[in-house]
Image (spheres, rainbow, N blue to C red):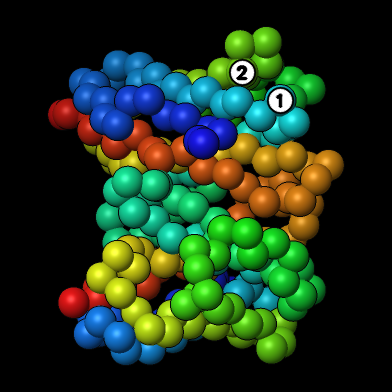
């Protein structure tokens, strides 16, 4: 298995632009998680899906953030409009629940909003 | 409010010695704990876990200890190797609840040759 695949690896965009991050989870995993890593807050959960259904989006910072999982093999995290404070590394992870072996993370997307 | 705390941002040890990374949690509902290791430009990778019904779990050079009464866990690496240099994240979940993992901010371990 190729693992969790995220694209793009790096994204630089101007403030106010729309940004879309993509994730392909491991085949057979039934849960998908979006995390954001910053120096100040560490790894924080934004949203997670179970069987393609959003279960908990309490970590989504504001309405500018939205996430979808149209099928078991694809998810997007969209920021519109983007702001400089959104600059961070965004990780996608997938897992079989119960996650006794933990999540498998992708390599992340480093987002810079200028 | 941080539910999982790693109070040491960094730790430096000599090759061959023991590395001890600490983690505290506040949520008494947490019943499953994990450690992840992260190299630069990569995602975190699962290292070792422990259920709240145990107080110790060992895997090769890595041992995790859990003290439920103190709401404290630690990761011991013996002997430490330069390849262990990475950021280590502690994570916790309430398996009877939502299954989501709550992470600490991480501790950067540097093992010097």
Q: Are marks 1 and 2 on the same chain?
A: yes
Q: What mark, if any, has residue B71 been given in the picture? A: 2
- Name the image quarter holding the C terminus of chain B: top left
Q: Residue at x 69, y 62 (%)?
A: A56
Percent x, y of residue A72: 71, 82
Quadrant location of residue A11?
bottom left
Left or right of A18, for residue B30: right
Q: CA distance from mark 1 to mark 2?
A: 8 Å
Question: Contact, CB < 8 Å: mark 1 with mark 2?
Answer: yes
Residue A10 can be seen in this image: no
Q: Nearer the viewer, residue A10 or B111?
A: A10
Q: Residue at x 66, y 29 (%)?
A: B27
The kind of secondary structure element at disc 2 is loop
Task: Give the mark nearer the N terminus: 1 vs 2.
Answer: 1
In this rendering, is residue A18 above or below B45? below
Front residue of this view, candidates B55 and A56: A56
Identified at 42% across, 84% down, the residue is A80
Q: Position of residue B3 (x, y in %)?
A: 56, 34
Identify the residue under disc 1: B28
């Amino acid at each position: 298995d190729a693992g969790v695949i995220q694209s793009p690896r790096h994204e630089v965009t101007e403030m106010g632009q729309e940004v879309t991050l993509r994730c392909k989870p491991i085949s057979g995993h039934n849960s998908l998680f979006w995390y954001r890593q910053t120096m100040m807050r560490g790894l924080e959960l934004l949203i997670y899906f179970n069987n393609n259904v959003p279960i908990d989006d309490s970590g989504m910072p504001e309405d500018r953030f939205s996430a979808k999982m149209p099928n078991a093999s694809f998810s997007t995290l969209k920021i519109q409009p983007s702001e400089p404070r959104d600059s961070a590394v965004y990780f996608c992870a997938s897992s079989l629940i119960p996650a006794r072996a933990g999540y498998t993370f992708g390599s992340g997307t480093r987002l810079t909003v200028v | 409010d941080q539910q999982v705390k790693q109070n040491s941002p960094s730790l430096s040890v000599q090759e061959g010695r023991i590395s001890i990374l600490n983690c505290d949690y506040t949520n008494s509902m947490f019943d499953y704990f994990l450690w992840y290791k992260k190299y630069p430009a990569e995602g975190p990778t699962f290292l070792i876990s422990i259920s709240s019904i145990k107080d110790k779990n060992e895997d090769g050079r890595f041992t995790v200890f859990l003290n439920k009464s103190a709401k404290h866990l630690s990761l011991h690496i013996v002997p430490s190797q330069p390849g262990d240099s990475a950021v280590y994240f502690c994570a916790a979940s309430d398996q009877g609840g939502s299954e989501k993992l709550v992470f600490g901010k991480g501790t950067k371990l540097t093992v010097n040759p």
